[in-house]
């Protein structure tokens, strides 16, 4: 993947440390890898740490953390490392792609921030740690990423390649697109009407699969503009999507699959919806809330 072709972002920042209040359930849209960490911790401590974390998003879970951490803008023109440069270019490509897409709809795309951190971070959704994995917080409209996750993606999930890493960022930006399109508000309304969040047919699964589909839309339109993909790149992204399916993670950690606890969708579903978005390049193909997810 010739990721250097991507536009540089002006919306990357970094900070370390932080603290304050813990997560409020539902505030953070758990990113890739976070689910696996929670499953493993649940097994170690013999407690269900998944349901309290992912359930009950009644008010969107926005909660001030009580403390703020030093934050500084990242120089994407003169990045401190290749990984930061990569993140800057991928983020910039999402801004250009979604900016053009929204403009074609007669709307304005509000760029999110990409916040790079190590260890812990204070967010508008509460305090988070590296163990959560990448995530999007609607409270401050930021994507949070510890760059160390990319190594974990390769070592733990056996998903290597630049496009696999790009998919991680694009998925979280997909949640931001949902936020701008009002999907979060609709999900909250449906939940208040009694629709379940978790489970194979739950709102959480449908929302996560739509973010996968939006990542595919980004992949389609960015490829048309930059022609930056090489043979094997798409397969690496599909492998990453498959590796973090609920069924795959549960089979690896529990030895059994429990569909009623699904929050992100199966491996096959995640691949299916990413491919749907990439094939069409159109968000209209991403209605994961209709019919079977």
Image (spheres, rainbow, N blue to C red):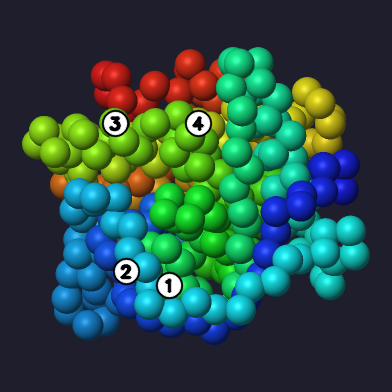
Give the CA separation, mark 1 to mark 4: 26 Å
Q: Which mark is residue 288?
A: none
Q: Which residue is mark 2?
A: 23
> At numbered mark 4, what does the secondary structure look like: helix, strand or loop?
helix
Give the answer, above or below, for where 130 lies relative to 228.
below
> At numbered mark 1, what does the secondary structure look like: helix, strand or loop?
strand
Mark 2 touches mark 3? (CB < 8 Å): no
Image quadrant assignment for residue 27: bottom left
Q: Residues within 10 Å of mark 2 (few under 14, many from 20)?
A: many
Mark toward the start of the polypeptide (2 vs 3): 2
Give the CA separation, mark 1 to mark 3: 26 Å
Mark 4 touches mark 2? (CB < 8 Å): no
Residue appearing at x 19%, y 53% in the figure: 56
Q: Residues within 10 Å of mark 4 (few under 14, many from 20)?
A: many
Mark toward the start of the polypeptide (1 vs 2): 2
Give the answer, above or below, for where 52 lies relative to 56.
below
Q: Which residue is mark 4?
A: 213
Mark toward the start of the polypeptide (1 vs 4): 1
Residue 157 horizontal/vertical position (percent): 53, 61
Give the CA separation, mark 1 to mark 2: 7 Å
Mark toward the start of the polypeptide (3 vs 4): 3
> At numbered mark 2, what does the secondary structure look like: helix, strand or loop?
loop
Residue 53 horizontal/vertical position (percent): 26, 64
Q: Which residue is mark 3?
A: 186
């Amino acid at each position: 993947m010739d990721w250097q072709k991507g536009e540089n972002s002006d919306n990357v920042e970094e900070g370390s440390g932080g603290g304050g209040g813990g997560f409020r359930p539902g505030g953070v849209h758990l990113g890739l890898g976070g689910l696996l960490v929670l499953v493993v911790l649940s097994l170690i401590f013999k407690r269900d740490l998944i349901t309290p974390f992912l359930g009950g998003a009644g008010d969107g879970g926005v909660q001030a953390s009580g403390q703020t951490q030093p934050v500084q803008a990242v120089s994407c023109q003169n990045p401190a490392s290749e990984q930061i440069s990569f993140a800057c270019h991928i983020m910039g490509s999402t801004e250009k792609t979604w900016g053009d897409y929204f403009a074609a709809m007669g709307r304005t795309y509000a760029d999110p921030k990409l916040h790079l951190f190590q260890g812990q971070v204070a967010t508008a959704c509460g305090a988070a740690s590296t163990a959560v994995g990448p995530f999007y917080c609607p409270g401050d409209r930021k994507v949070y990423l510890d760059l160390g996750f990319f190594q974990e993606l390769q070592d733990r999930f056996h998903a290597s390649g630049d496009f696999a890493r790009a998919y991680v960022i694009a998925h979280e930006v997909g949640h931001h697109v949902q936020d701008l399109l009002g999907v979060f508000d609709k999900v909250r309304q449906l939940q208040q009407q009694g629709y379940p969040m978790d489970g194979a047919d739950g709102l959480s699964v449908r929302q996560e699969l739509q973010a996968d589909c939006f990542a595919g839309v980004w992949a389609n339109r960015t490829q048309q503009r930059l022609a930056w993909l090489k043979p094997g790149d798409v397969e690496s992204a599909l492998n990453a999507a498959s590796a973090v399916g609920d069924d795959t993670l549960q089979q690896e950690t529990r030895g059994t699959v429990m569909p009623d606890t699904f929050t992100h969708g199966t491996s096959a579903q995640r691949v299916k919806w990413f491919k749907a978005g990439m094939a069409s390049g159109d968000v209209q193909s991403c209605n994961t809330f209709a019919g079977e997810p």
